[in-house]
Amino acid sequence: MLMVTLDELERAAKLVYAEFGPTPQTHYPLLSQLAGAHVWIKHENHTPLGAFKVRGGLVYMDWLKRSHPEVRGVVTATRGNHGQSIAFAARAAGLSCTIFVPHGNSKEKNAAMRALGGELIESGVDFQAAMEASMAYAQTHQLHRVPSFHRLLVAGVGTYSLELLRAQPDLSAVYVPIGLGSGICGMIAARDALGLKTEIIGVVAAGAPAYALSFKAGAPASTDVVNTMADGVANRVPSPEAFEVIRRGAADVITVAEDEIAEAMRAYYRCAHNIAEGAGAVPLAGLLQQRARWAGKHVCAVLSGSNIDVDVYRPVLAAA
């Protein structure tokens, strides 16, 4: 089973901090009133790319350049934030970057990836189809394929968890979104490396429930389709490696409905004046769903990203 060590997390942190500093964990009284608990928010929307994924890209690309100096280009698949991370790190490393996205992907995330030097190819109806196309493309064009789940990516994104849990070691629980699993696996690794008892609760959209179904079944379970505005968690095929870490280390994996995600997005704006994309709001939606469990306790929701299209965000706010 994959388990990133404290030494790996600390080495990854040195690479990350060469680019930007730790992100804050902030207590908001209005969110705490809403939840009936002492709520902390981990602000991964405050990274240079507006999402936590940039940490993993930096760590992976450092390893790639050192271990495979012959590589001239990389290819990956994404719904947006992972792709920005790889494009950002590849450009700094002097590598070409080809990114597969599904048709109908976020226009603004696509624009951001292109601005970072990524060449975009649209393929398939969802992330899984885009990922399978990227694998074939990498083989045909002899490019290095960057996976969406990998030990180095976990170590990189796990640095935000190390920051959080060292700053707030007495948290009763942390709510984390699950896309393919690097974020929650990093949180589990940091919690275990620090010897803490914090409950880690994964949250997925009801329209993309693969990891929740898997957790309940005790084995990876895929779905045929996904249907959620939270594109960062719109995954229908779990990573077996990620699932094993989640199965052993998470307290639960829960689902939240689209209206709960939208209400959490509005709560972030009203109570903290922060923008949350759908996947970034999923953890707060889960916390609010289970607020009765945490009355008076210290809990955290990870705001994993703020990269949302205006056309998606506008009607969410307008419904307030």
Image: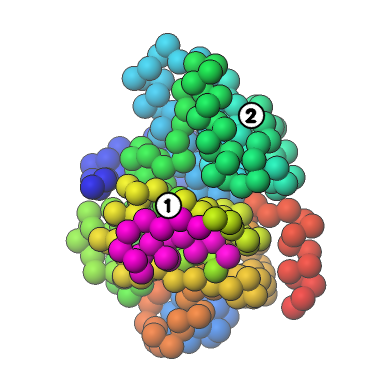
The kind of residue on which mark 1 rests is Pro
Q: Which residue is mark 2?
A: 118
Instruction: Indicate the secondary structure of the residue bearing disc 1.
Output: loop
Question: In this orientation, does residue 44 appear?
Answer: no
Residue 103: x %, y % from top left: 70, 42
Instruction: Indicate the secondary structure of the residue bearing disc 2.
Output: loop
Residue 33 among those drawn in magenta: no
In front: 310, or 299?
310
Q: Residues within 10 Å of mark 1 (few under 14, many from 20)?
A: many
Residue 143: x %, y % from top left: 50, 19
Whether residue 124 sits left or right of residue 11 in the image: it is right
Whether residue 64 sits left or right of residue 259 in the image: it is left
- Colour theme: rainbow
Q: How many marks?
A: 2
Quarter containing the C terminus: bottom right
Q: Quadrant of the rendered structure where residue 184 is?
A: bottom left
Distance of mark 1 from mark 2, alpha carbons? 26 Å
Residue at coordinates 51% horizontally, 79% vertically from top-left? 288
Q: Which residue is mark 1?
A: 238
Residue 211 among those drawn in magenta: yes
In front: 293, or 137?
137
Residue 48: x %, y % from top left: 57, 43
Which tag, 1 or 2, sits closer to the chain's start? 2
Residue at coordinates 54% horizontally, 55% vertically from top-left? 224
**Residue range (magenta):** 207-223
Residue at coordinates 46% horizontally, 23% vertically from top-left? 144
Evaluate if marks 1 and 2 touch, with contact meaning CB atoms under 8 Å apart.
Answer: no
